[in-house]
Image (cartoon, grey):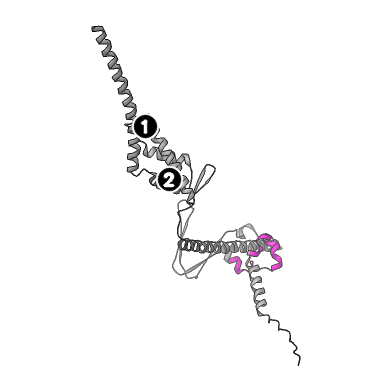
Amino acid sequence: DDDDDDDDDDEMDGGKRKHGGGEGEAGSKKKRLQRAHTGDKNNKGLRHFSMKVCNKVEEKSRTTYNEVADELVAEFVPTDGISSMDQAYDEKNIRRRVYDALNVLMAMDIIAKEKKNITWRGLPTNAAQEADRLQVDVEERRERIEVKRLQLQELLTQQISFKHLVSRNRAQPNAVPELNRVHLPFIIVNTSKQTVIDCEMAEDKHDIFFNFSMPFEIHDDNEILKRMGLHNCQLADLPHLVPPALIPFTPQYLLAQQRAQINLNLQPAPSAPATQTGV
């Protein structure tokens, strides 16, 4: 009898243990559900992750789903105090929310997706603000284009001057001695004869310091060549001096176009033909 009682106790204890294990499994599931529910209360819902994803993509400008999801998983999934099963559950939940958030942002045209690459497009604005922004952008681009156009004109003028200088030197009957040659680039300093000039060279011999007792002027090689008139040329000579594709950007071509437009405007308008009227 005692043996039977012991067996009954063992079976009862075993039943309790089995029953307790079931409660533990259910408790683990309930705990995960509570953690997920608590996460929503802590602003870890879709809206919160949409803002997080939006900030991530804007910061990177160009990224991928895996890169954004990995960073958010590392940010929100704790590594201490929870089991590996809970970590995997939280990670899966976050990755699903990131995927949903990316779809929302893509539907709002805030981001663009091409294969695996995600590109930031910008937050939506109203029509008036967008028009003002585009107008400012257009003006800035026009200013940059104008600066580039002037720089290109200056470079083309230098090329014309250099080619004329080469032709001028080749036309010299006698070769100029090496000591008398002026190499490009150079600068010329112009001042009064009564000016006292102190010159000092840096130890590395890369910089030279001048101190003038009176006013002075500094001219670079481009300005000197212009004063020599080497930048002037006929319109028909441009194909031999600059690349044909760049001729429309030369000052000579632009000046010819302006003159042609002025002459066109000065021409009298054709008179209307006289009409005969019958009586």
Residue 86 badge? 1
> Looking at the rendered structure, which numbered label has been put on residue 118?
none
Most common secondary structure along the magenta stretch: helix
Of all residues shown, which one is farthest toward the left? Answer: 2
Horizontal side, residue 259 vs residue 124: left or right: right
In the rendered image, residue 52, in percent from the top left (x then y), is placed at 40, 46
Residue 211 position, x and y percent, is 44, 63
State the quadrant of the N terminus.
top left
Q: Give the position of the C terminus as an image quadrant.
A: bottom right
Q: Is residue 241 left or right of residue 4?
A: right
Q: Give coordinates of residue 216: x percent, y percent.
A: 48, 68
Q: How many numbered marks, from 0 up?
A: 2
- Amino acid of disc 2: Val
Amino acid at the residue labelled 1:
Asp
Give the residue number, with chain letter if any, for mark 2: 53
Is 227 one of the magenta-colored residues?
yes
Residue 155 image offset from top left, x and y in percent = 60, 61
